[in-house]
Image (cartoon, rainbow, N blue to C red):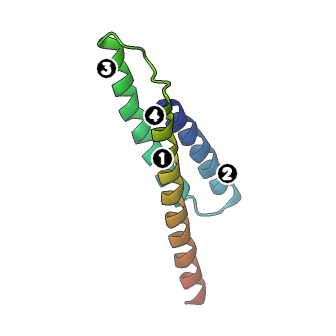
């Protein structure tokens, strides 16, 4: 389940990044968050393939795995928030100077 959630979060933040770039806004926070979720997705893809090769199911759809996915998505959104606030602070400092 965390694999599916991280793939979905990657897609959402890539979309946010492209929309921000198209609108002429800074997209560094969205791009960095998308890369973080992409890394998580790749990591869990390797884990899913390893589980499949070990004779288990491809995806773990348990409640514990869903909880892990929610924690990872929450952490990614927190990362995005911190990076976005930093972008806004730098932009306001540059406007004052």
**Between marks 1 and 3, how big is the CA–CA gap?**
23 Å
Q: Nearer the viewer, mark 4 or mark 2?
A: 4
- Please tell me which of labels 3 and 2 falls first in the chain: 2
Determine whether the residue tagged by mark 1 lies in a helix, strand or loop: helix
The spot of residue 26 in percent (x, y) is 58, 63
Position of 83 compared to 21: left or right? left
- Please tell me which of labels 4 and 1 falls first in the chain: 4
**Between marks 3 and 2, how big is the CA–CA gap?**
36 Å
Task: Out of 1 and 82, give the one closest to the viewer.
Answer: 1
> What mark, if any, has residue 19 been given in the picture?
2
- Please tell me which of labels 1 and 3 falls first in the chain: 3
Callout 4 crowding tier (Cα within 10 Å): few <14, some 14–19, many ≥20: few
> What mark, if any, has residue 64 been given in the picture?
4
- Circles 4 and 2, Cβ within 8 Å, touching? The answer is no
Badge 1 is on which residue? 71
**Between marks 4 and 1, how big is the CA–CA gap?**
11 Å
> What mark, if any, has residue 50 been given in the picture?
3
- Please tell me which of labels 4 and 2 falls first in the chain: 2
- Circles 1 and 3, Cβ within 8 Å, touching? The answer is no
Res 97 → quadrant: bottom right
Determine whether the residue tagged by mark 2 lies in a helix, strand or loop: helix
């Amino acid at each position: 389940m965390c694999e599916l959630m991280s793939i979905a979060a990657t897609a959402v933040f890539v979309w946010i990044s492209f929309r921000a770039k198209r609108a002429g806004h800074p997209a560094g926070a969205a791009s960095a968050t998308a890369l973080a979720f992409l890394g998580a997705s790749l990591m869990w893809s390797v884990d899913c393939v390893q589980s499949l090769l070990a004779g288990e199911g491809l995806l773990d759809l348990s409640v514990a795995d869903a909880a892990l996915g929610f924690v990872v998505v929450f952490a990614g959104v927190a990362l995005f928030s911190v990076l976005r606030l930093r972008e806004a602070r730098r932009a306001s400092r540059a406007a004052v100077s």
